[in-house]
Amino acid sequence: MRDIRHIEMPGHTVSVRFDPGPEREGRPALWPSVGEYPIYDPFLYTTMTTDDERNRRFRAALAHLAPNRRILDIGTGQDLLWAREGVQAGARHAVAVEVIEDAFHKAAANLPTLASRDRITLLLGESTNLRFAPRADVCVAEIIGSLAGAEGAAAVLADARTRLMEPGGTVIPHRAVTQAAAVRLSDLLPDQPVAFAEAALPYLRSIFDWHGSPFDVRLRVENPPADALLSEGAPVEVLDFNGDLPTQQSTTTHLAMTRPGLVDGVLTWLNLWCLPDEEPLDALHMKTNWASIYLPLFDSPVSVEPGDVLELTFVAALSDDRVHPDYQLQAILHTVDGQQHRGSLVSPHHGGAFRSHAIYQDLFPAD
């Protein structure tokens, strides 16, 4: 049974469909995407600091690049994680930047307890508004989203390379790619309702409170079954942090169906390289704090067969804050018998429509 909970906020009462089923290891779950918003709490920080798959890659990159260099840690968090790790790896000095005030104050309280405290400078604010000297040789930034660019990595790191780093400086991670494949949402949540996990409801409220009103949040799917994919994956967003790094991009790809089924959207997931020659982190197939993002395209599922092709155009353009991207998707499903089915999605970082697609109307039922 799918239950309904009400989120109360000034001027709004939002009905939310939630799954009261028990949480357990490996069970698929639907959440809002949270990394794009300044709502981090101890639970979210812990999921990152205990992410072994992520951490070993960042540590290996710092061990290779940090010794005797000056580093910049953007989004250092309450634990000053990569500033601390960088200094331990041999960096001469680390500048640690944090924009969330609560996390900054916790980091400031933690700094005096560190043996390396004299080699770390902690700054409050957006890196795009700060200046310091001397410039950094290496920038380490864990501001990568489950959609690779969703947390503003392209704009923030393009700015850092221009203003805050020495010419020829190196960014960690090296590359981030968003992959996409055709799916049906209900296949990603087998044998359970299509509804938000009960534990996700406080984060929904935090996002809506931050914005001041409800909007169609991006849908994060934890532990999706990989065999639910109807097509092979293909890259739709590519961020080369040490190469050409556009802050806006448009990609068109063709997803060929490999098995029969029903499709109503795409599932996206992250591939990440901290060093150029390593095997990438694959958020769909590895245990990591990065989850997959489901993006709806069709209000009703469409039947597909092998050989059908989903032509997908994926656009990332900076939102009005000039940091976080808005995403826009256009899709044409070409079937082998000559039919075409069109779908689309506008997914802004904040604001925009509420209950624009059938899935959002179901997740946020009208009174």
Image (spheres, rainbow, N blue to C red):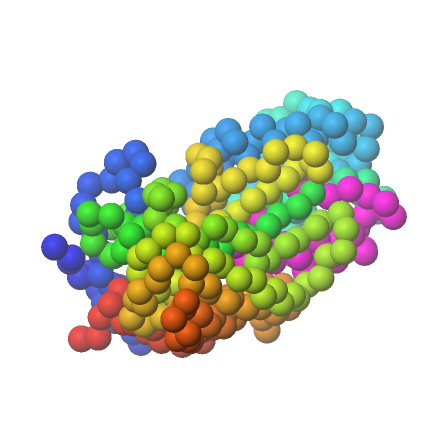
- Assign the N terminus to one quadrant of the image: bottom left
Figure quadrant of residue 317: bottom right
Range of residues picked out in magenta: 144-173
Q: Residue furthest right?
A: 167
Task: Please state if 336 lies on the left or on the right of 233 as rendered.
Answer: left
Q: Residue at x 81, y 33 (%)?
A: 69
Tell me if residue 189 is in the magenta stretch: no
Foreground pick, 244 / 130: 244
Considering only vertical position in the picture, is 91 above or below 345?
above
Image x and y of residue 161, in percent: 78, 52
Q: Residue at x 39, y 63 (%)?
A: 265
Figure quadrant of residue 280: top right
Foreground pick, 175 / 160: 175
Image x and y of residue 356, in percent: 36, 75
Q: Residue at x 57, y 58 (%)?
A: 236
Image x and y of residue 132, in percent: 80, 49
